[in-house]
Image: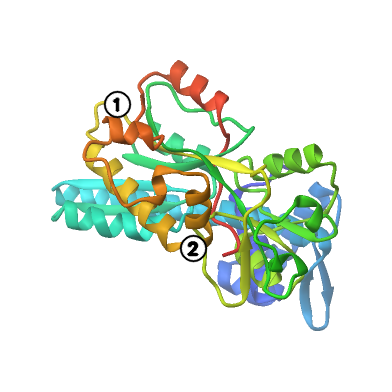
Amino acid sequence: MELEVRHLRALCAIADTGSLHRAARRLGVSQPSLTTQLRRIENSLGAELFSRGRTGCRPTLLGHAVLSRARPLVDGMRALVTDVKAEAEAARAGGPRLRIGCTASRVIGGWLRRLRIRMPGTDISLRVDVSAHALLRAVEAGRLDVAFVHEVEGCPLYVPDGLVQRVLVDREPQFVSMARDHPAAALPVVDLSDLAADRWMVDPTVDGEWDGLRRVFGAAGVEPTVLHGDYLTAASLVVLGEAVAPCQPTSGPRDDMAIRPLRDDPLAVRLLLVSRPGADMAAVYGELEDAYREAARQADGYHQWLLRNRSPLAHSSLSADPAGPDAARSGAGSDRHTASSAQSEAGSGPGCGRAESAS
């Protein structure tokens, strides 16, 4: 038996309601039918996903692992249907529109605010996804006009043929979040060895995230315990001191969490804006660059890092033309118009896209 989205939706409903009876009502099926479906799913996977008792159904350890991967797929399918309906309605209404996709980032809010001011009357929509590859496929298929994605170093993205990519930041260091009372929180810069005894939380559904972190651990010769889950869960574990997690340097500040750079910046991503050929993305790119600079300056730890490394991003001067010399100095404004050049660029720098982490 092959697992389908409806099976994953059933598992999520059982976990959310804690009862086969209540889950069946939510799904609009009979309880015996849902019980049979759950048994077939478990038989297919070769293990129990839920423990049944008088108090209801509770996910087993394997069940939690399956659910952590099932939920993004179910949410993605729901978002797909919602997006298609919205696009169909917008097409009927007419008028200019801009369909943006992105992996999660603190930059998004400021970017959208600037775009709405810059493009009054334009219908601007947003789709956030943990998968950079899913967003790139949506741009290729014409469901999105542009995608702002993160590549995890060492895990090159596959950019579909013909898409144009511009590099916003060639190498953005990833910081680490930890509880305020963590011993390493007293340090301005943290060594991976300082966190070798900690549990690390990573979201395996984010393209390249786990592979990139595993590569960094191997290079440092450390083997910490790794927990798999989404970054919303990670945040709650981090503040309780139960885990540490990689995070974007623009994250924070938070009173209940410390965010520190890693020594020698072993974990990094590249930030890309990808669009279809022929689209005029100069204004969209320019507003994104402004929003990123603003977010970088507001995150004190990252701002200090940028100053120490003498990065142009630490300063307020912005390029008037994203393809001009000022943009080139900041590592931005480079167009890649062909798939071969896009892929060679991706292969020479950081790799796959990732979502914003615990902060």
Secondary structure category for the residue under label 2: helix
Q: Position of residue 328 (x, y in %)?
A: 35, 31
Please say if 81 is above or below 31: above
What residue appears at the point 56 percent right and 24 percent down from the top-left corner?
Answer: 348
Identify residue type, mark 1. Pro
Secondary structure category for the residue under label 1: loop
What residue appears at the point 47 percent right and 28 percent down from the top-left corner?
Answer: 159
**First in residue order: circle 2 vs circle 1:** 1
Quadrant (top left/top right/bottom left/bottom right) for the C terminus? bottom right
- Say if residue 162 shows up in the picture: yes
- Say if residue 39 shows up in the picture: no
Numbered label attached to residue 300: 2
Of all residues shown, which one is farthest toward the top?
A: 340
Q: CA distance from mark 2 to mark 1?
A: 37 Å
Q: Which residue is mark 1?
A: 277
What residue appears at the point 72 percent right and 67 percent down from the top-left corner?
Answer: 32
